[in-house]
Image (cartoon, rainbow, N blue to C red):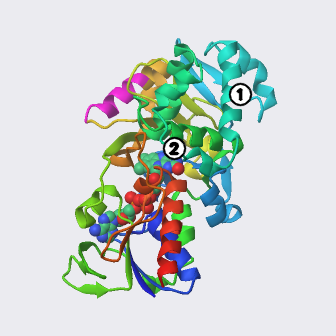
Amino acid sequence: MHVVIVGAGLAGLSAAVELHQQGHEVQLLEASDGVGGRVRTDEVDGFQLDRGFQILLEAYPEAQDMLDYAALDLHPFAPGATIRLDGGFHRLGDPLREPKQLVSTLKAPIGSPFDKARILAFRLAVSKGTVDDLWKGVGTTAISRFERAGFSQDMIERFLRPLFAGITLDPELQSSSQVVEFVFRMLSMGNAVVPSKGMGAISDQLAARLPAESVQLSTPVAELGKGAVRLEGGNTITADAVVLATGATEASRLAGSADPGWNGVTSMWLAADEAPIDEPVLVLNGEGVSPINSMVVMSNVCQNYATNGKHLMVVSTPSTGAELPAAMRRQLGDWFGGVAESWEEVRVDVIEKAQPKQLPGHDGRAPLSLDNGVWIAGDHRRDASINGAIGSGRAVAQAVSATG
Ligand SMILES: Cc1cc2nc3c(=O)[nH]c(=O)nc-3n(C[C@H](O)[C@H](O)[C@H](O)COP(=O)(O)OP(=O)(O)OC[C@H]3O[C@@H](n4cnc5c(N)ncnc54)[C@H](O)[C@@H]3O)c2cc1C
């Protein structure tokens, strides 16, 4: 079969790799100047910057199947998190994976001892059965799930809300409880990591498995026809099947599929002579004071992110707005004092369409085909993650292949 795939993000790349491996002829049409979609890395003044702060969870099953982890040279974050609270920083470890953190974790003024026990019980609950079991049924909202699990308001506000606001970009915790359960399971079963060459190395690794001539960059698709796509330049390409892997809004424009709307994020990259935090750990804001949600010294996780003996930090908020960068810098001043003023801004990423909303009942796990030979893949069809995008691309490829 000759399959045209529109969009070279992780979903499109995964679909293309799978179809190519099964002997089909693939043609991957990408509007932008590179592969990877939302997962790309740029070099800026010698620093390595991902497009917005992102991490790979090693336990993602689709990523494990599809990626060569050894070749990516993955660098782990420390398990757990450091919580900014009451003017200080408190380490909340994962005592099962990092026993030396047990004492500091029990002492941390975040939640009661019952909450800490409930975390372990929640981990056990979400680790039962298969990953697919987690996605059965409709679920509820994340906040309802936390309340049902018995977590105190203190634990939710100081730890769970900033943690999941960082992951789902939904500070209201209205996302599906199934997403929360899946992420919790992934966090419990493996490290959060970044490749030594940045998150874009994930996309590059997939693209390298395709014949070079099968990937056409700067080639936006304007319209879909029956078994054909029309390029913005006017040319028409016919195909036995078309896979639309463009992201939700563009898929909706081209093919009329549902657009769930988006959550946005602002990530500020800062260079410093000295790292304000020594560990490769995620720092979460447990004070409930906007705008900062999380902060990481990326050069503690992997030195490649920085250059010339400097450190590189990334500070994020699950929101967008012109006032945010200045407000984030003011808050860094509150946290770290005058030295924060000397930190040099390397880039600010404002990403309105970072993750499609994934409200309860957003069921899209089955491959979606329209009656005109068009298939829809992408994170909006599963869950808004690297795992969801890869899994959706692979599932659609297998379904397309089965028709040929
Ligand atoms: C800032 C940020 C942080 C994130 N953090 C994490 C994280 O920590 N962990 C995690 O697992 N996930 C994270 N995600 C989510 C994850 O990156 C996405 O779920 C995933 O990359 C989506 O892949 P996709 O292929 O479905 O879509 P996309 O990556 O959006 O790919 C769609 C592609 O289609 C192209 N395209 C669009 N229209 C056309 C057209 N008309 N013609 C041709 N091409 C077109 C686009 O240019 C793009 O390359 C994050 C996302 C962002 C933005």
Q: In the image as oriented, which residue stretches furthest toward the left?
A: 234
The residue at the point 65 percent across, 32 percent down is 278
CA neighbours of label 2 inside 10 A, class few (<14), some (14 to 19), many (20+) = few
Task: Estimate the x, y position of residue 393 in percent, counting from the top left.
Answer: 49, 66
Q: Position of residue 35 (x, y in %)?
A: 43, 68
Q: Which residues are magenta?
A: 322-331
Furthest toward the front, the residue is 137
Confirm whether residue 45 shows in the render: no
Image height of 295 relative to 349, above or below: above
Instruction: Give the residue drawn at x 43%, y 28%.
Output: 292
Q: Is residue 109 above or below residue 191?
A: above
**Which residue corresponds to mark 2?**
137
Residue farthest toward the right in the current orientation of the protein: 99
Q: CA distance from mark 2 to mark 1?
A: 24 Å
Which residue is at a point 43% across and 52% down the rendered structure image? 51
Query: Which of the two labelled residues, at mark 2 and mark 1, occupies the earlier sequence position?
Result: 1
Q: Residue 120 bears which disc, if any?
A: 1
Please count the marks in the image.
2
Q: Residue 60, position in %: x, y?
A: 62, 52
- Please state which of the two labelled residues, at mark 2 or mark 1, is closer to the viewer: 2
Q: Main secondary structure of the magenta part?
A: helix
Badge 2 marks a residue whose secondary structure is loop
User: Going by the image, does 89 lie left or right of 236?
Assistant: right
- As for residue 323 lying within the magenta part, the answer is yes
Q: Can I make out residue 81 in this image?
A: yes
Q: Amino acid at mark 1?
A: Leu
Q: Is residue 327 magenta?
A: yes
